[in-house]
Amino acid sequence: MKRLLGLCAVGLALVVAAGPAMADSSQQQLVVIDQDTSGPGGSNIRSMLALIQSPQVKVLGIGVVTGNAWMKAETEHTLRMLELIGRRDIPVYKGAVHPLVRNRERTLAVQKFYGHIAWLGAWGGDGSNPSGFPTDPNARQKMPEGRPSISAREQDAAHFLIHAVHAHPGQVTVYAAGPLTDLALAQRIDPSFARTAKQLVVMGGSISPVTDNAEFTTSPSHEFNFWFDPEAAHIVLNAPWPKIIDTSVDISLQSKYTDKMQAAIAESDSPAAQYLAKYDTERYYMWDEIAALAWLHPDLVTRTRTLYLDTDMSHGPSYGDTLAWTQKSKPDAHEGPPAIVQMKLDRKAFDNTFIDLMRAPTPHATHPAIAGP
């Protein structure tokens, strides 16, 4: 009896510690977000807003990983966004600062031999002036939206991910739209992590994009999230997920966030709409938003391919490029499940779905929105 009471007390403590974001999820799809959340606005933030705004979704928490910007700066943008839309109840967890193996110094050095890299993220943006980007991962960056008054949780992102899937076995979708370092660490810490989740929804990889974009006409298998941490992508893509849904460059290039979309969203007085109206200046492909919305609305995707995915880890000119095989051609050493790779987008339906979500009231807000500067 004492043992039973002790177990009950532990269970109750876990529920209380998890907070409101981990409770009362029976009517919604559960999701954990792991993202390189540069901001304000932009594809990273907009994809998180899409999940938060959807009444179909319960966001259990957000892990932040270095990618487009350094993790610490990204964390501040995420916390401030949550404040401004009135969702301070969603916990935020700091993740990996650096990739598992790749590093900035060697990456910049090898460009002299293998050619210019189109996007360096935290290590130099578009590569035109890497020295203009901070090398200190703790450097404070300008925040037009103001600095947050709330803080990230003490637990790290990898352990948060592990605890979340084990709290709801077979129910949690892992949404990963940045480099996969946090997920790889979670899988290495707990080999049961991937198989305990419901599925992996990932933005990453490039198969055979049809485009005149110079970044992909010359390097069609290159994609930033997989490239930034190839070893992490290899670990994650070879893990025993029940299911993988992948948003590739191929489908991402069929989208674009436009002034017209921004104007339509800005007509709403919802906190999410007004956040974007004030702070979103990025007009580019909607990489991560497709991953979020196509998971919730599969009919937005009109063509897919079933492929086994991995990354090139040969440390040559194609280091970090996407590898893809059919069932017939895949190597015996590949251990992960096939991915449903999205290839064709219903652009009109996608744009309308995103606009409607941003214009809608924020569901289940537990705090009132606060005014920005």
Image (cartoon, rainbow, N blue to C red):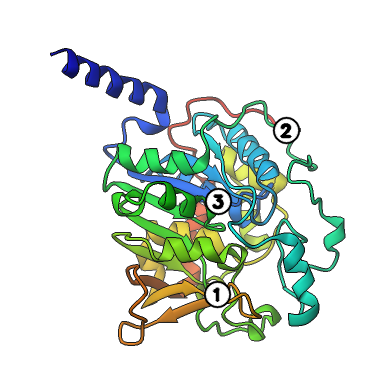
Identify the element where label 3 is drawn.
Answer: strand
Q: Secondary structure at mark 2?
A: loop
Instruction: Determine if residue 357 is in view.
Output: no
**Separation of marks 3 and 2 at Cα, in angstroms:** 19 Å
Q: Is residue 297 visible?
A: yes
| Quadrant of the image occupied by residue 313 | bottom right
Q: Residue at x 32, y 50 (%)?
A: 192
Query: In the rendered image, which quarter is residue 221 located in?
Result: bottom right
Left or right of 353 in this view: 150? right
Which residue is label 2 attached to? 147
Residue nearest the viewer, comparing 270 with 18: 18
| Quarter holding residue 349 | bottom left
10 Å crowding of disc 2: few (<14), some (14-19), many (20+): some
The image shows residue 357 at horizontal and vertical percentages of 49, 50
Q: Earlier in the sequence, mark 2 or mark 1?
A: 2
Figure quadrant of the N terminus:
top left
x, y (%) of residue 277? 68, 47
Q: Residue furthest top?
A: 2
Label 1 crowd bin: few (<14), some (14–19), many (20+), radius 10 Å: some
User: What residue would you read off at disc 1?
Assistant: 254
Q: Using the image, determine if residue 42 lies above or below residue 206.
A: above
Q: Earlier in the sequence, mark 3 or mark 1?
A: 3
User: What residue sits right under mark 3 in the picture?
Assistant: 35
